Image (cartoon, helix red, strand yellow):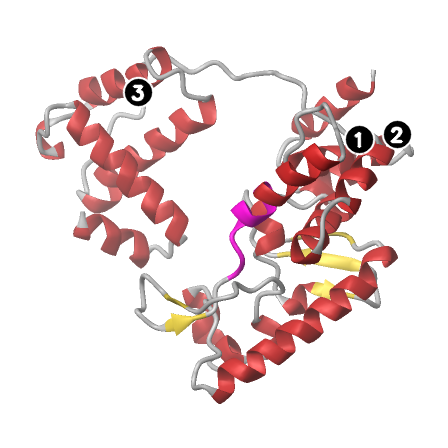
């Protein structure tokens, strides 16, 4: 798998994508009796993808990710032409309506949280961010003057801006002061670097130690970057927020199944109820296709 990892890094794939692709490629090889990919082709790919849909009942997005990983293996790593007309059994797209909290329920949930998790939840409900987007925010992504948040290279690859409610300004200012103190401590101890994508690292050579590029919600502990081997301070894990939301839901006696993503759904539905244009909401949420956004109109009915 070293060749796969090297190729993924050459094309600047994110570390999470690297781990996912390597995992899918290994599963594909094991499913086919550990045969070398050079000895396999369209038939083996179709069998594996059909197995995921029929026997594993994976979501359509999961099956697509497996397909993309295998195509990357053949086209980019092995340099082989591959027939894209793969006739595998397709996973059905689930059309369940999202769970949405009322404004009172959302505020009750957040009021039963504390510390960093409470600020994270407030941002998800007030700005409509995804879980991974909110934990990946950097200090310079916050624009107090224009009351907006910059979401850099989120799911889908495009940058966007979203709302930054004034009620969140004071908690975020306090959070930035905490990060500043922590960063100064790290620098004094010979650390202070933060992960940057390769292209940014080349463009801004000192950015990885600048305050503005530090994560808004840093981890409590330093860790070794799996690619460079350097000791850095990563962002907080989204599991921290997931656990906190679960505890708060029980405290608040909310019957609905509430997760961090429920807060994003609730943000979207609230804006539509307040008369926000569907296209504006699409841009705020970062949806590629407006039909994804339109699901919230069904929730309102």
Report if residue 9 is visible in the image: yes
**Is residue 255 or residue 272 the one in the foreground?**
255
Residue positioned 37% across, 57% down in the render: 12
Residues marked 2 and 1 touching at CB (< 8 Å): yes
**Where is 225 relative to 90, above or below?**
below
- The range drawn in magenta is 235-242
Residue positioned 43% across, 71% down in the render: 232
Residue positioned 75% across, 69% down in the render: 174
Residue that label 3 marks? 49
- Quadrant for the C terminus in the image: top right
Residue 273: image tag: 2
Q: Where is residue 215 in the image (x, y as percent from the top left)?
A: 57, 66
Q: Position of residue 158 (x, y in %)?
A: 59, 49
Task: State the SS at label 2.
Answer: helix
Residue that label 1 marks? 269
In the image, taking residue 174 as reference, residue 189 lies left or right, namely left
Label 3 crowd (10 A; few <14 / some 14-19 / many >=20): many
């Amino acid at each position: 798998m070293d060749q796969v990892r090297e190729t993924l890094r050459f094309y600047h794939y994110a570390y999470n994508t690297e781990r996912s692709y390597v995992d899918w490629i290994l599963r594909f090889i094991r499913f086919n009796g550990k045969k070398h990919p050079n000895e396999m082709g369209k038939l083996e790919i179709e069998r594996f993808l059909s197995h995921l849909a029929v026997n594993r009942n994976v979501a359509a997005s999961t099956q697509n990710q497996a397909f993309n990983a295998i195509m990357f293996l053949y086209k980019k790593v092995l340099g082989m032409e591959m027939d894209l007309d793969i006739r595998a059994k397709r996973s059905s797209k689930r059309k369940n309506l999202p769970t949405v909290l009322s404004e009172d329920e959302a505020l009750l949930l957040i009021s039963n949280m504390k510390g960093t998790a409470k600020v994270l939840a407030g941002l998800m409900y007030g700005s409509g961010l995804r879980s991974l987007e909110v934990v990946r925010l950097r200090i310079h992504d916050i624009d107090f003057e224009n009351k907006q948040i910059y979401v850099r290279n989120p799911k889908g690859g495009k940058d966007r801006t979203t709302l930054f409610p004034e009620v969140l300004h004071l908690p975020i200012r306090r959070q930035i002061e905490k990060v500043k103190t922590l960063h100064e401590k790290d620098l004094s101890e010979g650390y202070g670097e933060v992960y940057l994508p390769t292209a940014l690292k080349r463009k801004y050579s000192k950015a990885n130690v600048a305050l503005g590029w530090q994560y808004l919600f840093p981890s409590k502990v330093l860790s070794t970057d799996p690619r460079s081997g350097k000791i850095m301070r990563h962002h907080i894990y989204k599991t921290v927020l997931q656990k906190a939301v679960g505890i708060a839901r029980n405290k608040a006696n909310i019957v609905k199944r509430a997760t961090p993503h429920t807060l994003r759904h609730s943000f979207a539905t609230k804006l539509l109820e307040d008369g926000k244009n569907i296209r504006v909401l699409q841009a705020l949420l970062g949806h590629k296709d407006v039909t994804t956004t339109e699901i919230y109109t069904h929730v309102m009915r």
